[in-house]
Amino acid sequence: MAGRDDMTATNADAAAGAGAASVPALEARGLEASWDGTPVVADVSLALEPGEVSCLVGRSGCGKTTLFHALAGLTRPTAGQVLLHGREVTGVPGSVSYMLQKDLLLPNRTILDNVCLPLLLSGMPKRAARDKAKPLLSRFGLEECADRWPSELSGGMRQRAALLRTYLMDNDVVLLDEPFSALDAITRGEVRSWFCGMAAELGLTALVITHDVDESVMMSDRIFVMRGNPQAHVPSMICGVVEVERTCSAAEAQDAGFDLTPQFISAKAAVKELLGS
Amino acid sequence: MAASGTQGPHAPQRAGRTPRAGGPSHVRRALVPTFTILGLIAIWQAVVDFGVIQRFLLPSPTDVLSALVGDWALIWEHAQTTLVESIAGLLIGVAIGFVLAVLMDRFEGFYLAMQPLITLSQTVPTVAIAPLLLIWFGYGLAPKIILIVVTTFFPVSVSLVAGFRSTDPDVIDLLRTMHATDLQIFWYAKLPAAADQFFSGLKISATYAIVGAVISEWLGGQSGLGVYMTRVRKSFAYDKMFASIVVVSALSMVLMGLVEVLERLCMPWKRAERKHQ
Ligand SMILES: Nc1ncnc2c1ncn2[C@@H]1O[C@H](COP(=O)(O)OP(=O)(O)O)[C@@H](O)[C@H]1O
Ligand SMILES: [Mg+2]
């Protein structure tokens, strides 16, 4: 059931987004994930509120991707559970949308067919899938690229295409593994603002991995900080959660100069302290 | 293929290795080999015309050409047999190689069982088993086609297995989060990943096919370029011998050309990739 929350589960979906008293969109309880028998992450518990964008930060190699694989059901955690809207989905792939660290566009399919992929795989006929995806291309700034090959696109465009493909997986919870890391600093800010606007508009619940502390504070309501050293057999854990006090929406943060506010600076300091740097 | 999934940082290196095809270098690329071949033919002609080598031992290029023209009707008739055997053997060989590769990719046990056998089959000299095949299957088309099948399935199955195994595991994970079935993973990820290597294998197989046909005809039969060669050799008509060699080379090149055309048709995205990397 709904863990710490004291509400009734029946009207949970109706009340989604109405406040703290709802079933988490995605919840992990005591999750442990391993590679070759060595635990990489241990005892991870976290809950994402519906409609909330959160970040997961941690040093390179601390096990963020490993945790995402477990949350997405690609690997079976060695301990613990994953719940989607209160329903157990541990080890079941495809319950949440997952954008992996690389854009992974198929080189032999046009951009339109690449973003159609989740629809085609679910058995939708090609024509119907294209009709559904086409209107969305312009919203993702890809209308010119429908019939191009992935190799013909810039990094930013490829990333948008991967995001649109993730969106068409049609789950309300999305996991994004360093979605902006392949982009240069300027494009990065733009794509991030655009993504935050999109997420807010669509009411997505998102957990975003980044190793960039500034980025995490710019875009999220809450930041989960992960710490540990799996190489030295110290499994990583969530060592703290930082709530960001927002003065404006995440989509406007860049333009409004949120990074100059005391709220930004104190959140950043809190994250850095938890990271131990 | 696998490499094209991870563009970004690798792109500049590639651009450095493949020089841009500007006007002059394009012409050069066509002219240099043409003049080399023409030069060698001219030297050959001179060597025979000036009596450095006796004409009955080595016919000159013009002798070969007139033999080719004079005996064309007969040569063409024999060439057709060779072509039919080669194409039939190649098609069957490719089909068997494909099925073997799919099974080897799907079942680890089958892979372990077949790998040494397939390699072993390639160490058996063609000339040694051809007479046996003639004894077992008679002097018709069957032993020739079987010999071609035996020599052509190998490059295809080996290159396909390697290609299937080169599929980016992250792509497979991505497809799994989209509820892909094994068959869909094969169709959307593995087959395209293997396409490049498949066609390199097919090109090798195509040349093996013609050569294999000629060798088996040589050892017995009523028709085919190999049969023609044994006959003209017995009558010491070396000009006709060379004429048939020219035809064998030409057939091999035509077959390779066809494979290349097929490759371009099947992989239209390669052109864009070459241009943009
Ligand atoms: N395929 C793998 N096989 C074995 N160990 C792995 C594999 N992938 C990652 N690891 C180990 O798990 C640890 C965490 O990796 P990862 O989750 O990719 O970290 P992050 O995403 O935080 O950079 C690393 O220390 C690495 O040694
Ligand atoms: Mg990672």
Image: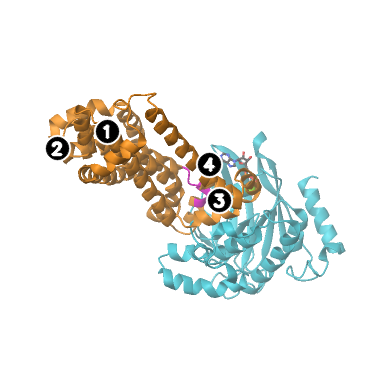
Chain colours: A cyan, B orange
Going from N to C along the chain, the mark reached first, 1 or 4, is: 4
Q: Quadrant of residue B163?
A: top left
Q: Decide: few, some or many residues near mark 4? Use Cα within 10 Å; few <14, some 14-19, many ≥20.
A: few
In which chain is the residue bearing label 2?
B
In which chain is the residue bearing label 3?
B
Dot 2 falls on a residue whose secondary structure is loop
Q: CA distance from mark 2 to mark 3?
A: 52 Å
For residue B241, which numbered disc appears in the image? 1
Q: Is residue B59 magenta?
A: no
Residue A184, visible in the rendered structure: yes
Residue A167 percent across, percent down from the top left: 56, 66
Q: Is residue B169 magenta?
A: yes
Going from N to C along the chain, the mark reached first, 1 or 2, is: 2
Specify the amino acid type for callout 2. Answer: Gln
Residue linked to disc 3: B5
Residue B156 percent across, percent down from the top left: 36, 41
Q: CA distance from mark 3 to mark 4?
A: 35 Å
Q: Nearer the viewer, residue B23 or A73?
A: B23
Do tags 2 and 4 sit on the same chain?
Answer: yes
For residue B222, which numbered disc appears in the image? 2
Q: Identify the residue at the far front of this view.
A: B50
Q: Are marks 1 and 4 in contact (CB under 8 Å)?
A: no
Q: CA distance from mark 2 to mark 4?
A: 42 Å
Going from N to C along the chain, the mark reached first, 3 or 4, is: 3
Q: CA distance from mark 1 to mark 3?
A: 50 Å
